[in-house]
Amino acid sequence: MRIADTSDLWWKQAVVYCVDIERFLDTDGDGSGDIAGLAERVDYLAELGVTCLWLMPFYPTPNRDDGYDIVDFYGVDRRLGSFGDLVELVRTAQDRGLRVIADLVVNHTSDQHPWFQAARSSTASPYRDYYVWRAEEPPDTSGKAVFPDKEGGIWSRDEATGHWYLHRFYRHQPDLNLSHPKVRDEIAKIAGFWLHLGLDGFRVDGIPQLLTVGQGDDLENQGGFTDPHGFLRSLRRFLNRRNGRAVLLGEVNLPYPQQLELFGTEDAGELTMIFDFVAMQNLYLSLARQDAGPLAGALRSRPPIPREAQWANFVRNHDELTLDQLSEAERQEVFAAFGPEERMQVYGRGLVRRLPPMLGGDRQRVRMVYSLLFSLPGTPVLYYGEEIGMGENLAAEGRMAVRTPMQWTAGRNGGFSSAAAEDLSGPVAEGEYGPGAVNVAAARRDPDSLLAFVTLLARRYRECAELAWGPAEVLDQPRPGVLAHRCSWEGSAVVALHNLAAEPTTVPLRLPDEAEGTELVDLLADGTCTLDADSAAELALEGYGFRWLRVQRPHGPGTLPDVMTTVAGAGEA
């Protein structure tokens, strides 16, 4: 497949890296990471193989919800830097070939936002309908709160007018009313503003909550927001007019049929990309059981999506590792395996842990999971620090346990900041996953580090267009602990094998549509095997082993991609 055929739809084969600016690198010694610090590390990200930088919120905020409580959608928080710093970051990233996207958080505002301050001043305020109100006391809504341990419901009484306002998240984050045309216009203006400053799109926060605002019995007499798909189509068209390369990456933790609806159609696109929460949660169930069945089932049930759409695959993100789409019994299996202590769990549905500690520091098993991440059909998304194997700090509250400062060196504060420890934006991880044991400087000097391995995975992924463009075909084979899948696109194919079990095994693999003599060329190590007269081969996998194999057909065309990946795969591990 020619690079020229894929480059226009850049998001189909990107490597996305999520950064919490406040915890990445502090250049002025105030204890908070800043935009200038991130700009200083753009070369590091480019060397890693990142092609798209995702910025968590950098807008002005009271910071009661780690920046997701916004008081100005058109600004930059002074703690992090200035507009000039942001423009320089975007320019520097683009100079190195990186796209930049940012969080679009339009579910709600901070209660300190001027819109809400005006809205609560009087029932006659022109900003009143920017939010959702009710005059009578609401019924019990304790089962609807996103954060059930913090909020007893989704309505709170405002003393100024005696009315109740809607907030699906925290009470200090009143929900915006998407049924109001002026609110929808404001969202378009916000997106247009940041696109004009050079961004290439947005990760849209909490899509299910955003699109249910205005529906059902929550709003009663508000008229309701009855056309969420029309809104997304309109927003996508607007982005296409302002920046034809811009994307909307949706946080959509819903079953596949509902996710599919939010992609839109070939002729009327909605979200460009959607995080695959279904596969992620089933991955952890498979890891807990050492049985590939749950993940294989999720991949088999993935629906076909529009050609220009894409799945975003991830191992974890900045929130809790949610398991809410598993059954209660399945969730308890994962808790027992990877978060048996109460402090490791949150909201009754998720874990506040990073992968290496969950897997007991098992080097081979951790690598197997990241190999799987990069080989699954779709676009891989990394959360900062994953590439070096950072752990969590369970002394931090809730989801903040996985939002610890980046570990650059073994020195003071992990090289994140020169400030006193008590002035840092978050506590540094400690113990066997602290900076003394896990840091970028040491990893860069070690050719066998996780950082080196993830860099290799990113390079191989970018060389294998099939993994991004081709649908997943789960291959039949008799080993329950093994996931075997093939991605095919325009006559070429890559097969990936992953052993989720601790015991070594040999996988009898048959590819009946391939001819005798077809070679399977290893892409992560030096080696090949050849299909026999039955189009089959025996493939050895160690415990938690993995292999990427390019299908090299006999007498096939010596295309450049075949040559490139064969040469690149030789002798490297």
Image (cartoon, helix red, strand yellow):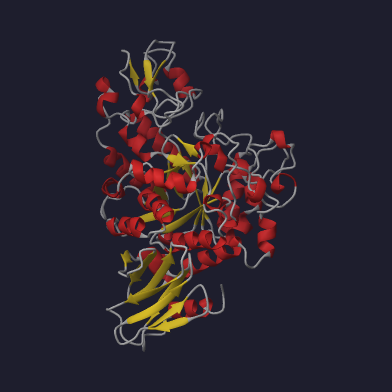
The quadrant of the image that shows the C terminus is bottom right
Choose between 403 and 541: the one closer to the eye. Answer: 541
> Residue 238, relative to residue 517: is it above or below?
above
Would you say 90 lies left or right of 129 here? right
How many labels were placed on the picture?
0
Going by the image, does 242 lie left or right of 69? left
Residue 479 higher or lower than 230, as above or below? below
Please state the horizontal and vertical placement of residue 311, each as a whole percent of the image: 37, 55
Q: Quadrant of the N terminus?
A: bottom left
| Quadrant housing residue 58 | top right
Q: Position of residue 12 (x, y in %)?
A: 40, 60
Residue 174, x across and y down, in percent: 42, 25
Q: Give residue 372's quadrant in the image.
A: bottom left
Front-most of 320 and 259? 320
Residue 275 visible in the shown view = no
- Against 437, residue 112 (above or below) is above
In this rendered view, identify the residue nearer to me: 389 or 454: 389
Q: Name which residue lies at 39% across and 47% down.
A: 239
Q: Is residue 194 visible?
A: yes
- In the shown orientation, is residue 400 left or right of residue 536? right
Q: Can you give x and y, in whole percent of width and height, for residue 253 in the image? A: 36, 43
The residue lying toward the viewer, choosing from 85 and 51, is 51
Q: Which residue reaches farthest bottom?
A: 555
Residue depicted at 38% across the width and 62% down the height: 377
